[in-house]
Image (cartoon, rainbow, N blue to C red):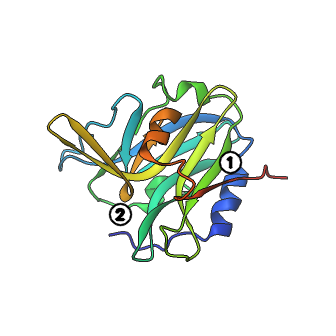
């Protein structure tokens, strides 16, 4: 279990504003290890990836940002955006490993281009302040969603549930829509403002 608190809405917006306008240089996934040998489990499922613990991007301007899931009260999980390395927030010696995915074809359209970071907010029907259910990264060439979700396959059917303590990166807007991410009853978008 992680020992830190989730970020405030203001902190998440501040970090998104810092990332907006920067150019991504490298991307790392932080995965739950399959065992003591620190071998990464399968994470590439085509239009979506499962980085489990976190996604870290470094920018050409020298910034390091990480998207990681956090628990929001007892009612849901959200994606916080930090301006620090993912490893700083994971237990030292824990069962996690990292994989450089900078050369993956799904990430290449975002590399070397200015990105915009924004959030999809959801209160899970509680009426409480919403948590960031998803972080969107977009460039002039592509976009993706980093969301809290879990999945399982039963026979030939894939079941994905949003709002769980796992991260999934979705590279296809139609797939994100099919999962219900754009459902107006679920949440709302709020773009980050570019830093001054």
Q: Which residue is mark 1?
A: 19
69, above or below 180, in the image: below
Residue 53 seen in this snapshot: no
- Graded by Cα atoms within 10 Å as few (under 14), some (14 to 19) or many (20 or more), the crowding at tag 1 reads many
Contact between labelled residues 2 and 1, with CB atoms less than 8 Å apart:
no
In percent of width and height, residue 98 lies at 37, 43
103, above or below 116, in the image: above
Which residue is the extreme one toward the right? 196
74, above or below 144, in the image: below
In percent of width and height, residue 171 lies at 49, 33
Residue 44 found in image quarter: top left
Residue at 22% across / 38% down in the picture? 157
Q: Secondary structure at mark 1?
A: helix
Residues 182 and 111: in front is: 182
In percent of width and height, residue 141 lies at 65, 25
Is 148 on the left or on the right of 44, as rendered? Answer: right
Q: Which residue is mark 2?
A: 91
In space, the residues marked 1 and 2 are separated at their CA atoms by: 25 Å
Label located before the other in sequence (1 or 2): 1
Residues 47 and 54: in front is: 47
Residue at 44% across / 32% down in the picture? 101
Is 38 on the left or on the right of 175, as rendered? Answer: left
* Quarter that holds the N terminus: bottom left
Residue 47 seen in this snapshot: yes
Residue 45 found in image quarter: top left
Residue at 44% across / 77% down in the picture? 73
Residue at 48% across / 40% down in the picture? 176
- Dot in front, 1 or 2: 1
* Circle number at residue 196: none
Q: Secondary structure at mark 2?
A: loop
Residues 73 and 81: in front is: 73
């Amino acid at each position: 279990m992680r020992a830190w608190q989730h970020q405030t809405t203001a902190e998440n917006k501040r970090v998104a504003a810092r990332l907006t306008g920067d150019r991504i240089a490298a991307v790392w996934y932080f995965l739950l290890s399959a065992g003591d040998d620190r071998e990464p489990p399968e994470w590439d499922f085509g239009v979506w990836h499962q980085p489990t613990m976190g996604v870290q991007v470094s920018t050409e301007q020298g910034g390091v940002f990480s998207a990681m899931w956090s628990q929001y009260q007892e009612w849901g999980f959200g994606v916080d955006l930090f301006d620090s390395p993912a490893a700083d927030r994971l237990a030292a010696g824990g069962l996690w490993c990292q994989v450089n995915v900078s050369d993956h074809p799904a990430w290449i359209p975002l590399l070397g281009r200015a990105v915009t970071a924004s959030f999809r907010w959801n209160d899970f029907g509680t009426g409480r302040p919403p948590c960031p259910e998803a972080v969107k990264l977009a460039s002039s060439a592509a976009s993706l969603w980093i969301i809290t979700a879990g999945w399982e396959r039963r026979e030939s059917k894939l079941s994905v549930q949003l709002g769980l303590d796992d991260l999934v990166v979705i590279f296809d807007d139609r797939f994100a829509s099919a999962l219900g991410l754009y459902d107006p009853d679920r949440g709302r978008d709020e773009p980050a403002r570019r830093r001054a």
